[in-house]
Amino acid sequence: MKIFVTGCAGLLGANYTRHLLANGHEVIGIDDLSGGYKAFVTKGENFSFVKLNLERRKKIVDLFEEHKPEVLVHFAAYAAEGLSPFIRNFNYRNNLICSANLINECIKHDTKFIFTSSMAVYGEQEPPFTEDKRPQPIDPYGIAKYAVECDLKLAHEQFGLRYNIVRPHNVLGIYQNIWDRYRNVIGIFIRKTLNGIPILVYGDGEQTRAFSDIKYYMEPFDRLLTEYDGETFNIGADKYFTLNEVADAVQKVGKKYGYEVPIEHGEPRHEVKHAYCDHTKAKSMLQFSDGTNLEELIESMFVWAMKQPNRKVKTMEYEVTKDIYDYWRN
């Protein structure tokens, strides 16, 4: 099967392209390298890499004309819920307009669209979130993701576009960008520990999240390629932790490898307090099974991170600075 994978330099894309190639597929990986690294892009037979900003509509038109993929797996996104109110224009261009460009071409070429949305669409509700809960996002990132979900449903009803939606949450693993100061909380904690910087927990640290190992996502994604149409699935871990517990776990692993830093608390940010999902549907229909051991996963990521070059931490250009948090001003 010929498959387009966007965001092939990011956590989900880098891992899934390798999985697809190992299972005999032809993969065209697409990434603009704004949120990932060329070193994370795979190489080999049956794989080609295209560096492309997905806002460039004409280039996307040409790419679909040249390759005519059977399936598009759309991982590319800038997933920073807390930052998105301060970068609205960038957020909607990156997460909504780019997706619309891809939807257009999938309609034209009868390409099945697999969309990675986000738990952020649920907003502030009583967890665990089930797929039938009415989305009510509280930030521009969640709004963009939900808008794409709505557009896919419309394209399905009007043009017969085949699609499936996955709402993953708090995924971890190698090839994760731990050098981004705004997203991937455990990656941020690990990077700070390795650089001797105190671990900063926003607010009281009693926010709850459920973290899962990327390796458990591969086979469920495979089923989405050929099975089902118009379905939405939550995928992630069932067991949740407070961010205080997560910070303690990273600190413990750091001490084991000779990196000892304190834990500090900063001002709270605008975010959902308790966010984790129900995965009954994915377990039943996709045979999804999560076996994540968080401490072991943090340690494996820590060991991987120790071997990485000390890349420069990127700072975004804020479009709005009113009420921006002190820890993002520097």
Image: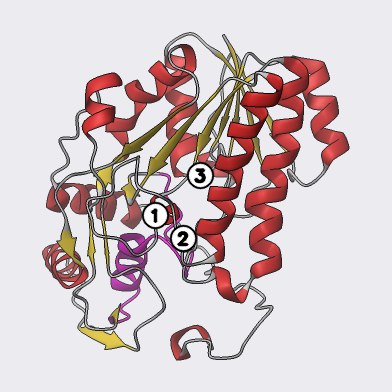
> Which span is picked out in magenta?
175-199
In the picture shown, does residue 19 fall above or below 26? below
Q: Are marks 1 and 2 in contact (CB under 8 Å)?
A: yes
Residue 29 in magenta?
A: no
Q: Is residue 314 visible?
A: no
Circle 1 crowding by C-alpha within 10 Å: few under 14, some 14–19, many from 20: many
Q: Along the horizontal axis of the image, is 1 left or right of 129? A: right
**Quadrant, the N terminus:** top right
- Report the residue at 21% width, 53% height from top: 298
Q: Position of residue 308 (x, y in %)?
A: 41, 54
- Report the residue at 30% width, 64% height from top: 190
What residue did someone put label 3 on? 10
Measure how far apart labels 2 and 3 are at the Cα level: 24 Å
Circle 2 crowding by C-alpha within 10 Å: few under 14, some 14–19, many from 20: many
Protein image colouring: secondary structure
| Closest to the observer, 215 or 111 | 111
Measure how far apart labels 1 and 3 are at the Cα level: 24 Å
Measure how far apart labels 1 and 2 are at the Cα level: 5 Å
What residue did someone put label 2 on? 137
Which image quadrant for residue 18?
Answer: top left
In what element is the residue under mark 3? loop
Q: Along the horizontal axis of the image, is 109 left or right of 193? A: right
Q: Is residue 140 visible?
A: yes
In what element is the residue under mark 2? loop
What residue did someone put label 1 on? 122
Q: Position of residue 222 (x, y in %)?
A: 41, 18
Q: Position of residue 63 (x, y in %)?
A: 79, 25
Query: Which one is earlier in the sequence, the residue at label 1 or at label 3?
Result: 3
Kind of residue indicated by mark 3:
Gly
Kind of residue indicated by mark 1:
Tyr
Residue 184 in magenta?
A: yes
